[in-house]
Amino acid sequence: MTAAALSRRPGLKHLRTRRNGLYLACLAFAGLVVLVALIAPWLAPADPNATDLGAALADPSSGHPLGADIAGRDTLSRLLLGSRTSLLGPLGIVAFSTVLGVVVGVTAGWRGGWIDTALSRSSELLLAFPGLLLAILFVALYGEGLLAPVAALSLAYLPFVSRLARSLTLSERQRPYLAAYRVQGFSGLSICLRHLIPNIAPVVLAQSTVNFGYALLDMAALSFLGLGVAPLTPDWGSMINAGQSALLQGKPLPAVLPCVAIVVTVVAFNVVGEHWADRVARREQ
């Protein structure tokens, strides 16, 4: 009997979903946000950093469709350009934490023994440090900007991915098709890269999609505190901070609109990720 004929997981190609209204709406919205972030410079009706004190806290009009902030900057333009930095940071966090987490988790689960113990205990140590506090420490050491908080939060999210990858690897390595590959003389590295990782990818991808939403919240919180992107760079978190004073003057749009953008985007990515995870879990049964 060949290895291909033995029981094997479906892999990414079977990560399909039934029609679900909420899921499809969230998937469409998440895709729209990504598309807007890519083409934001061509969509923005004005320079997002152009100040006009005469238009400070202006109500929505033809010149400012969503009004203006306290410095007279166009709110719509800042929302559109802010989507780029608001998504770029979480994307970096998810990418780095997923790649490193899969490497650590698969290595620990495949090799076992003292390697498993050392890597597992190291990952658990990272769980002792709250992500935001770790990011604040990195910003204090290396300065403001995206690099420091992205690096810190990548380390904070790494244990969640590595523990999932380790658990999946321990379960997967008991399957007959992997045993068949080992009998045929394939190396452990080859088996992991060509067969094991592609087969656990749907579960990891679903978890990473959920992590993206949480990372977006964390990065927005750091920007709100003034520890994220540079002050003049459009960003949803920093827009909320800048809009606080407008709230006291009865002008909620500069602060409320970026809040809505963050909440709806996070919910959309979480619904998509959890839906994928549920579908994968049902296929495992």
Image (spheres, helix red, strand yellow):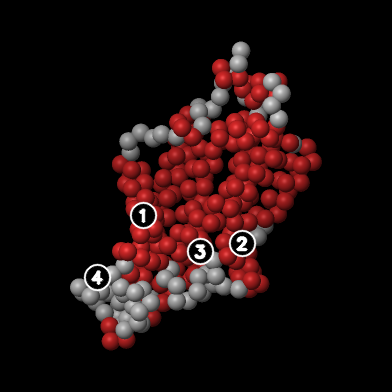
Between tags 1 and 3, which lies in front?
Answer: 1
Q: CA distance from mark 3 to mark 4?
A: 27 Å
Sooner in the amino-acid sequence: mark 1 or mark 4: 1
Residue 88 in view (yes/no): yes
Q: Nearer the viewer, residue 187 or 178?
A: 187
Residue at horizontal 54%, vertical 66%?
146
Sooner in the amino-acid sequence: mark 1 or mark 2: 1
Q: Nearer the viewer, residue 235 or 125?
A: 235
The amino acid type, in three-letter code, at marker 4 is: Pro
Q: Which residue is mark 4?
A: 65
Q: Which residue is mark 3?
A: 219
Asked if 9 appears above or below 201 in the picture, the reply is above
Q: Which residue is mark 1?
A: 35
Q: CA distance from mark 1 to mark 2?
A: 27 Å
Sooner in the amino-acid sequence: mark 2 or mark 4: 4
Q: CA distance from mark 1 to mark 3?
A: 20 Å
16 with respect to 126 (left or right): left
- Tag 2 secondary structure: helix
162 with respect to 30 (left or right): right
Q: Callout 1 environment at 10 Å: few (<14), some (14 to 19), or many (20+)?
A: few
Residue at horizontal 62%, vertical 44%?
102
- Tag 3 secondary structure: helix
